[in-house]
Amino acid sequence: MHIFFQVVLPVLLIFGAGFAIQKWKQVDIKPVSVVALYVATPALVFQTFYDAEIDSQYLFMIIFSFALLALLILFNKAAAKIGGKSEKKETGWILSTAFMNAGNYGAPIILFAYGQEGFAYAVSFMVIQAIIMNVFGIYYAAKGYAGARYAIKSILTMPVTYALLLAVLFQATPLTMPESLTGSVDIVAASAIPIVMIILGMQLANMKLGHFDWPSVSYGVAVRLFVSPLLAYGLTLIMPMDPLLAKVLIVSAAMPSAATIVMMAVQFDNQPRYISSVTLVSTLLSVITITVLLAWLG
């Protein structure tokens, strides 16, 4: 219970604030999301990579991210084949289980659980996941008809891409930012996590329970909350990574389904009701599973 009150509850309270505001005022989420996407999150990404000491651990993080994605896709393909499911069902399973909410849920949990050092890893992982979702998430949501060009265009329109590239430029050269500018970036970056947490609460308020395909929803939730962290744990055992990074990656892999994928599913009309159902149920149950996982990891 100590972990719940010290780590999970503070995060839930902020989600709850967003949930309550949305239920009360029915706020248009899009303008708030634009602020988070185009201002706050890029500032956080730049700040993190500008200050980070880039080493082999970041390479392990990239390898881990793509290996976990590949394993989850293969797991869903095998399950669909064994169960005699259609390609459409297989695609829905992949969308709802292969992409985790590493940003507006995972990052704050890591911050409360492992402090600033763990949070730096979490933000880096969040950027990698954002890129993965904007390539593979779009591909599976569109199931081919959007094409690679659409995915690449999506990445190039992500402000975090340019924030990352700018930070890497400073890392690779003797150039430094004036203190007045870094102070401004730090102020905006500090707002990123609270804003995205409130947005998630607002998104959850717009989702509704009822009339679920419970067998498929249960499968998606089980893969997202149990299979994914187990696969992540196995990957960390075979990589010579820092113990703190291993914990951050395992906890991140245990996060519920990404809310961003719901928006992609809606955009391409690819089983949005099913994917939003898995997102909602996995988010609710993760309160218990994340608490237990954090206690187990220590």
Image (cartoon, rainbow, N blue to C red):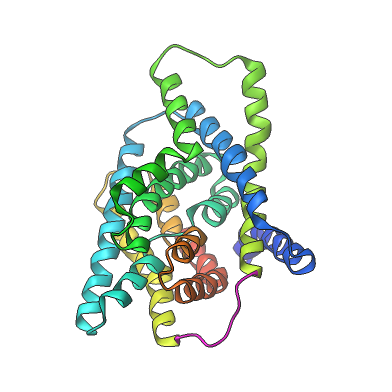
Q: Residue, x 61% and y 78% (percent of image)?
A: 208
Quarter where residue 99 is shown: bottom left
Which residue is more in the foreground, 271 or 205? 271
Up-down relation of residue 112 to residue 27 (above or below): above
Residue at 24% from the left image edge and 52% from the top image edge? 238
Position of 71 compared to 49: left or right? left
Magenta span: predominant SS is loop
Q: Where the N terminus falls, by quadrant?
A: bottom right
* Observer able to see residue 226: yes
Q: Which residues are magenta?
A: 206-213
Q: Note whether 90 is above or below 112 in the view shown.
A: below
The verdict on residue 182 being magenta is no
Residue sitting farthest toward the front: 145
Q: Whole-percent x and y of residue 175?
A: 47, 12
In the displayed image of the protein, which residue is found farthest to the top? 174
**Considering depth in this image, is 27 or 56 the residue closer to the camera?**
27
Instruction: Determine if the magenta segment contains residue 209.
Output: yes
Which residue is more in the foreground, 78 or 213?
213
State the image coordinates of residue 145 (x, y, percent, origin top left). Answer: 30, 59
Q: Position of residue 278 (x, y in %)?
A: 47, 74
